[in-house]
Image (cartoon, rainbow, N blue to C red):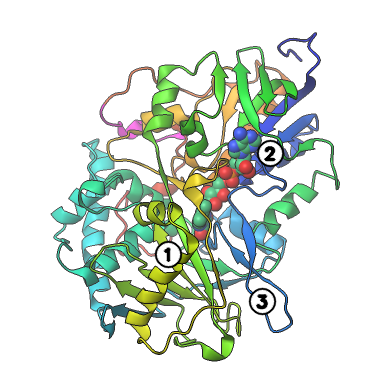
Amino acid sequence: FPVLNVSSTCEKTQVAILGAGVAGITAAVSLANNSVSDFLIVEYNNEIGGRCRHGSFGKDGQGNSYTVELGPNWIEGIMSPGGPTNPIWTLVQKYNVKNHFSNFSSHLTYDTNGPVDYLDKLDTFGDAYSIVEQDAGNILLENLQDRSFRAALNLAGWKPIGDPQAQAVEWYQMDFEYAQTPFNWKDVSSEEFTIANYNSTFYGFSEDTNFVVDQRGFNSFIHGQASEFMKTNDSRLHLNTVVNNITWSDQGVSIVNADGSCIDAAYAILTFSVGVLQSGDIHFSPELPDWKNTAIQTFEMGIYTKVFLQFPPDKVFWDKSSECFLYASPTRGYYPAWQSLDHQDFLPGSGILFVTIVTDQSYVVDTQDDDTTKQQVLAVLRQMFGENNVPEPTTSMYPRWSTVPWAYGSYSNWPPGLTLEGHQNLRANNGRLWYAGEATSAEFFGYLQGAYLEGQKVGETIAACLEGSGDARCASEKSYEVLHGTTDLDEYMLVNGWTETSFQTIGDVSGAGIGG
Ligand SMILES: Cc1cc2nc3c(=O)[nH]c(=O)nc-3n(C[C@H](O)[C@H](O)[C@H](O)COP(=O)(O)OP(=O)(O)OC[C@H]3O[C@@H](n4cnc5c(N)ncnc54)[C@H](O)[C@@H]3O)c2cc1C
């Protein structure tokens, strides 16, 4: 097989897989399933899993730490009878990853004065959201101009300005899922593709989401997958190796790492996050063409931060039968969604509570010290549950996703006005350098299933290329040098990374907009 610099001293391989997250490991499974065993996986960290990552936290009665998920916690969208199944759900069952149905109707509402019932505002939001779904379907089917999610909600009559409870409800329904806000000038979400993304997962698979509480960690499904094709200490897995330079062409790809090691590959699969690609930490030679660079810089990266607290288990002050506590602050997005792990279905007796914040507030906590954040969350808890009822936590912890140099953020988000062609440019290969990851999925961006499906697809494509570049399955991805303003209906097809799932309404069809 042809590679660059055949005379060089670099390690040689047929396929260099850059990154060992879900996309990278799934690409390797695809190659192995297609009889390609000559590949190398290069990974920044000292373990596989990527953003699917856990940490040790707190102590149980025996002095052992608990495992908590720093990254994904949910299998989002499971399956509907007779419909497609989320591939992550299939893997979680295969490798017995412990999970439990998340009951989102098990929530209580609070504001600065303590408990107060504003659940009815969730219904009002739901009514407006159904109108937005119809509107988004119309935009897609009629090839109309996309708009921001804020504009869409306003047009549907949902205007939460000046109402902290309504803002908390909006945060719970939007920011909690997309890690980005539809709030006023900060709005960075497309109406059309946010709705399509929601439909693909929650109408395509099902509206159920299951919460993972496996003490081996959520990523044990990735370890399970890897064990199917790799031995312990497999020499094809290069951990603790940071890629710095990528030289690409139609003949092959050369990679130079920070430790000076290098690889010459016939093909490479790049799975780094949009945050890493945007950062400029990776140098490309030749420079990436404008159409590719524009796509990378246009797609958005959201931050999703969980702040964990452990309280003495005998001093738990919240209702242990509830899963979620929503807090309405005058400042929208200020420590709004609290989840209890001390629940009979999760980690009973653990005394662990965590609060989620996203992008704007995440940037704030990422630049302040742990103690300041702890004092802020305790002040909120004391407003919610009473000044004298909330003791000092025994420990607290949170990851700073915006600063992690192998991710620079949590997951991607589709900005207003970006067309399907614009997104396709994020997916499209540059010569023999191919791309995969959650962000390259047109329908499932942000989710584990997006990373899985994109990794699988690229693995199969390159296996076909290695059989013979004349193989039709090896054709280059379509790319667009000139971007037009909208996307014709007949472009929603595989050539642009679009399957038919967003047009299905297998789950709850009550508000299905796109094609529904
Ligand atoms: C806080 C949080 C919550 C989330 N919640 C959910 C959820 O509940 N459900 C859900 O489905 N999804 C969720 N997601 C999204 C999900 O985690 C991602 O979609 C998925 O893990 C992305 O996989 P990937 O393979 O595309 O990328 P990654 O996992 O980022 O894999 C890329 C790999 O490349 C490596 N890398 C980066 N730079 C370099 C370099 N220079 N050299 C070498 N290696 C490098 C990284 O270390 C990483 O291992 C969440 C993510 C986060 C962070």
Q: Residue at x 24, y 42 (%)?
A: 139
Residue 511: assigned label: none
Residue flagged by tag 3: what amino acid is it? Lys
- 291 to 300, vertically: above or below: above
Position in image of residue 513 (x %, y %): 29, 53
Q: CA distance from mark 3 to mark 1?
A: 23 Å
Q: Secondary structure at mark 3?
A: loop
Circle 2 is placed at which residue position? 43
Q: Quadrant of residue 421?
A: top left
Q: Is residue 332 magenta?
A: no
Q: Residues within 10 Å of mark 3 (few under 14, many from 20)?
A: some
Q: Indicate the quadrant containing the N terminus: top left, top right, bottom left or bottom right.
A: top right
Q: Residue at x 66, y 19 (%)?
A: 253
Q: Image check: 406 left or right of 134?
A: right
Position in image of residue 516 (x %, y %): 32, 53
Position in image of residue 165 (x %, y %): 23, 72
Of the residues under marks 3 and 2, which one precedes in the sequence? 2
Is residue 412 or residue 434 the one in the foreground? Answer: 412
- 482 to 100, vertically: above or below: above
Q: Mark 1 near ligand 1 (CB under 8 Å)? A: no
Q: CA distance from mark 3 to mark 2?
A: 31 Å
Residue 372: assigned label: 1
Q: Quadrant of residue 133?
A: bottom left
